[in-house]
Amino acid sequence: MKLGISSYTFTWASGVKDYLPRVPLTPQDLLNKANELGVNLVQIADNMPLHTIDTGQMEDLIRIATGKGIELEAGAKGLTRDNLESYLNISEKINSRILRFVIDQQDYKPSLEEVISVIREAEPELRSRGIILAIENHDRFTAMQFLQIIEKAGSPYVGICLDCANSFGAGEGFKEVVNCLAPHVVNLHLKEISIKRKYHMMGFDIEGRPFGEGLMPLEWILSTLTPECRTAVLELWTPPEDTLEETIIKERNWAKQSIDYLRKHIKE
């Protein structure tokens, strides 16, 4: 399993709505971050959308990645037929063997049947290009519904991007999600969290942490996965500090701390 980073490792530096840094992180900057951290995999996701960069920038990205020996993975959201086709083309250009997709976007929340239809229609194209579609468990659907998507697709070119924490948004804990989806995981999103009661004891706060300081059962999760899980990328839910500049520094420090920790546990 190859360890890497994502554009969601440096979410604040890339730009969060209403909190944009003066100079947001670019895909090329992300390659430099990977180099500094000593990893050779970068997943560029929807917070740094690849379809918005021009041909020259794309060529520069590919050239720099090749020169640094960094493998690229594409990520997107909004699983429509057109968007999937667009990102298959992008994946082919950057030689991304795994295409991670979040199904929903703000104005698009398809039914389970619509999702299955889009994927089954695209399966011959996935197969012919040798690209594996990795559907991320992301909030709205349950683990059993994601399993249904995979089983209905019935293809080795459709799998799961397993996020360690997202399914709390669907009312599910990580153990039931991992037990359900582990056999189909092709890409892992590594995300450390803490869960603490609110001061008044009525409710909980789920918050990001650097790896080694939270409650994610990393060794157990890794032990459940099959060799079909080819890549694992760090994502961070970094709680903000008083200023954006302080938050970006914190995010950078957490990235280094987490990669140092994960490198001891993930054998490439």
Image (cartoon, rainbow, N blue to C red):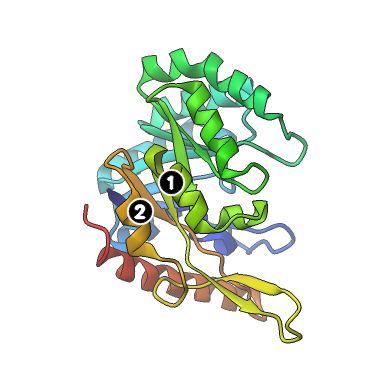
User: At label 2, which amino acid type do we have?
Assistant: Gly
Q: Position of residue 109 (x, y in %)?
A: 73, 35
Q: Position of residue 153 (x, y in %)?
A: 49, 22
- Please state if 75 lies on the left or on the right of 73 as rendered: right
User: At label 1, which amino acid type do we have?
Assistant: Gln
Tell me if mark 2 has few (under 14), some (14-19) or many (20+) residues whose alpha carbon lies within 10 angstroms of its own. many
119 up-or-down from 56: above or below? above
Residue under the point 34% across and 51% down? 224
Which disc is residue 78 wearing? Answer: none
Give the CA separation, mark 1 to mark 2. 8 Å
216 up-or-down from 246: above or below? above
Q: Farthest residue in the left direction?
A: 267
- For this rendering, which residue is in front, 22 or 18? 18
Q: Which residue is mark 2?
A: 4
Q: Which residue is mark 1?
A: 43
- Judged from the image, the secondary structure of the residue bearing numbered disc 2 is strand
- For this rendering, which residue is in front, 178 or 19? 178
Please report contact status of discs 1 and 2: CB closer than 8 Å, yes or no: yes
- For this rendering, which residue is in front, 45 or 164? 164
31 up-or-down from 255: above or below? above
- Judged from the image, the secondary structure of the residue bearing numbered disc 1 is strand
Mark 1 and mark 2 lie on one chain; the one further toward the N terminus is 2
